[in-house]
Amino acid sequence: MSRHISEQYDLELAQIKELLMEMGGMVEQQVNHSCTALVNHDDALAEQVRDVESRLNQFEVELDDHCVSIIARRQPAAGDLRNVVSMMKAITDLERIGDEADRIAKMAQRMTDDEPPTDLYADFRSIHENVGRMLHRALDAFARQDVENALRVIEADEEIDQAYNSLVRKCVREMRDKTEGIENSVNMMWAARALERIGDHSKNIAEYVIYQVKGLDVRHGGDTEIDPSED
């Protein structure tokens, strides 16, 4: 009987994780579509991103309910509890990434009729590519419980912050030199800020991997001098 209960519990956890990864795939697509819509002035694609947002919100509610149900029925302890808590936190971060993608899509719609400077597009695309890699690597690390990959995500966050700050400085110069383009520059800064936040949420997901595997809380500048091979 004990073995049967354990197997059933493992199955429930696996099902939640599978749904979480499905949500992660949707979120990745949302981020890519929203950034593509902004750069290509694709209003239809931006609207598609905004339409999917409600589905992501529903995903969050359903998955949270599953996790709460497991805690209430199974009363997991130690490592098992860390797994459930980490999944709940990751679900929240994925929903917030979806919110940021929706924000980028909103900026894309505002910028449809105008053309920001090409060099800002190049900077935005570069941030998008790097953040996209961060998010994908964080999700992969979460799926595989890969501490080494999780640490690489955490380390990449500073580079994203620097690139975002650089783009903001360029936008400020544009607003100072070409007053007719102020609105577009402001929209570009908001879109870039959303990408920077997506990087932060990706970092959070990577930190949950370390918490699950190592039982260590590395948030808020905690120690990341971790040997991935050590138990």
Image: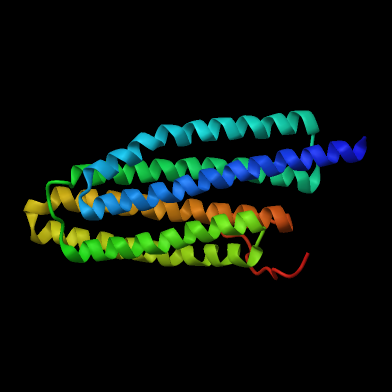
The spot of residue 206 in percent (x, y) is: 58, 57
- Whether residue 220 can be seen here: no
Quarter of the figure with the C terminus: bottom right
Q: Is residue 99 left or right of residue 59?
A: left
Q: Nearer the viewer, residue 184 or 10?
A: 10
Nearest to the observer: residue 132 or residue 214: 132
Residue at the spot 72% in from the left edge and 46% down from the top edge: 82
- Compared with residue 56, is residue 135 higher up or lower down, i.e. above or below? below
Image quadrant in which the N terminus is located: top right
- As drawn, the residue found furthest toward the right would be 1
**Residue 118 visible (yes or no):** yes
Q: Quadrant of residue 213?
A: bottom right
* Image location (x, y in percent) of residue 217: 66, 54
Relative vertical location of residue 189 with respect to residue 17 in this rendering, above or below: below
Q: Residue at point 74% right, 41% down? A: 11
Image position of 172 with respect to 159: above or below? above
Q: How many marks?
A: 0
| Residue lying at 31% horizontally and 46% vertically, measured from the top left | 104
Where residue 128 appears, as percent x and y from the top left, is: 36, 59
Colour mode of the rendering: rainbow
36, above or below 66, in the image: below
Residue 25 coordinates in the image, percent (x, y): 49, 49
